Image: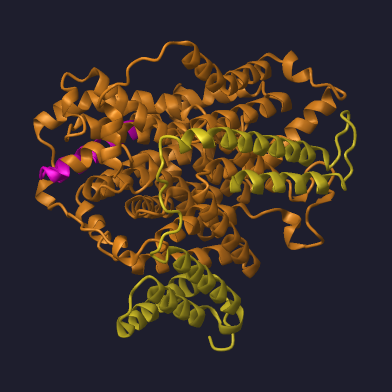
Amino acid sequence: MLESLQFLANGFEVAGTLQNLLYCLIGAIVGTLVGVLPGLGPIAGIALLIPATFGLNATSALIMLSGIYYGAMYGGSTTSILINVPGETASVITCIDGYQMAQQGRAGQALAISAIGSFIAGTIAIFGLVLIAPPLADAALAFGPPEFAALMVFAFVVLSNVTGGSLVKALMMVIAGLILGTIGLDPVTGNERFTFGSAYLLSGIEFVAVAIGVFGLGEILVNAAKPPQQLEQRVLVPRFRDLYPTLQDLRRSIGAILRGTGIGFGIGLIPGPAPVIATYAAYTVEKRISKHPEEFGKGAIEGVAGPEAANNAATQSAFIPLFVIGVPFGPVPAILLGALLIHGVTPGPLLISESPQLFWAVVASMYIGNFILLLLNLPFVPLFANMLRVPKKVLLPLVMLFCITGMFSVNNSVLDVWMMLAFGALGYILRGWACEGAPLLLGLVLGPKLEVAFRQSVMISHGGFEIFIDRPISLAFLVATLGFLLFPLLRRAVRLLLPKAPPPSGGPKANVAEGQS
Amino acid sequence: MAAAISLFVFGAITVALSLQLPLGTLRMPGSGFFPLVLGLALMTLAGVHGVQLRLAKPKAATPEPQPAPQTPADGSTIRVVLFMGTVAAATALLEPLGYTLSSFLLMLALLWILGLRRWHLSAMIALASAAASYVIFVVWLKIPMPSGWFF
């Protein structure tokens, strides 16, 4: 513990240099913008900025890119509260009570509680990261190829189960991503695969092209499909003097913030789109334990405080599996893994011991970043809210221009831009099929790692698969995977066997639908 | 059903191409082994999805006797095709025309497609965007964007 604090102090020295402070600030501002502007999520935001980090060292690059991730969680609530449109998916739940508060003239208080809750949750979660990451890294040293292979299969299945849509569709997306990940040189033998003689494909599919295409361009096309009159919305900008919560607001929120922090931190440690699930879980818990459940959906401040704290805590704890095991459990950490690999850093159990400067500097920068974001999101909220007044018919072409520029600058190649366009069209089609892009991206990024771990495992066991069952950690992951796969079937069987209960009237679903409309 | 068919075909192509690669043995899997397994898995899942849809179809038809119209009459498909076509044209012209000019033309065309029909305003926004992105990306960030025939 003391050793960790000593390392953290050193981390503050690195993160506190003028250069790293500047990158932390840029990350926080861009993250807030990405969160504020509907249609541009953290995945596309980070992917767009990866080329801008090529001139930086790995520490500065990761400080900036992770700032975008947690910054987006702060910014996402602004549009949810002011115009009832979530800036990114983790802010969908905030629409329900946040927008109702704004309708009652309490937008300032909702925004302030959201920023304060996010700050408290972020700060506590980083402390949890400092406590948990080093011992977990020591434990992860016991992981060999079979454990990694089983863990990745577990992550894919859990992610597919919790994305909200059909499990089969999500699994198809994972496998499609894994297949795309096999294009290029075989990571074990060096043979060419599916390159059709093209030198461009030797290094595989550029994951930045997939990220910007599926998530950035795909979303732009969805907006472009709307009639021009549907693109614009009335924006309600709060006054600076309204941006403070009353004592009663604070008293009602503090419990929700702390509970949201605990829920979010726990959920961040399991595979899936952690910040999104955390907000749903926190909202459900708050409504269930509230003395005034009837206020939820009509402007209950706990309905803003709990979910906003939860998505920030989940964002911070999602860094733990990425740093400690080297396996990202969600699409945004997967993008960060890609960025780290570009910078020559391989996350895993040895990262903390071999690159302590990078790990602790990034952790320290998160403390600083949270503080910057609190400052940005309280007094400057009216400024960010005014950005929503930029008409979408101007904003979308601008974002498109940035997508092309960002994509070109990855390898200074027009072929990359064509690749991005192809994946943009695919992203648009996938939305039409109600297929999620996140499992596809995770499959693409983790595909080569899974293949190497799988092939090494069967080589170690001389062609047998019992190695996955003989080793307890691997067996535990496989049993859990089987449980997650069979759970929907069992649930359906139980529903068929049990007599039908009368349908519940009203309830949270009605409120959620109302909030999202 | 389009998703199931498309992904089944994608899986089948993967299987066919994998079989042309060395498969190796279980003791030493070759380059084609992993994609072959993935292709077969994708075909299976796509098949399951197709069957699910087939079984679910008659059920859905009963409670909803009046299905919603599938093709929107508001020209959304035309807008998406025009948007993608313009972006593709700008990408094709990126190297011959150069970054700044192709950015200007891209902005101008996209603004028109998205409904901004005042040419003076569109031209000003397009010019400002092209100039600002040139300053940010080429001058400040030193990204070697194509200079083309002009600049």
- Name the quarter where the C terminus of chain A is drawn: top left
> Which chain is rendered yellow in the image?
B
Q: Is residue A489 above or below residue A337?
A: above
Q: Out of A279 and A437, give the one closest to the viewer.
A: A437
Residue B125 on image: x %, y %: 34, 77
Is residue A436 visible to the viewer in this orientation of the structure?
yes
Which residue is nearer to you in this view: A71 or A419? A419
- Residue ID at (49%, 80%): B100
**Residue A110: x percent and y percent?**
19, 40
Based on the picture, tell me whether residue A116 belongs to the magenta stretch. yes
Q: Is residue B138 above or below residue A102?
A: below
Q: Residue at x 60, y 41 (%)?
A: A173
Instruction: From the image, state the color of chain A.
Output: orange
Residue B144 appears in the figure = no
Q: Quadrant of residue A515?
A: top left
Marker count (numbered): 0
Image height check: is B24 above or below B131? Answer: above
Position of residue B115 in the picture relative to residue A221 (left or right): left
Query: Is residue A220 placed above or below A431 in the rendered structure?
Result: below
Left or right? Give the position of B7 relative to B13.
Answer: left
* Residue found at the very far bottom of the displayed protein: B150
Quadrant in the picture for the N terminus of chain A = top left
Asked which colour scheme the image uses, the reply is by chain
Residue A480 image offset from top left, x and y in percent: 59, 18
Left or right? Give the position of A436 relative to A187: left
Whether residue B121 is in magenta: the answer is no
- Residue depicted at x 37% and y 24%: A263
Magenta region: which residues?
A101-123
> Residue at 44% of width from left, 33% of height from top?
A274
Predominant SS along the magenta part: helix
Residue A305 point in image, percent of width and height: 24, 32
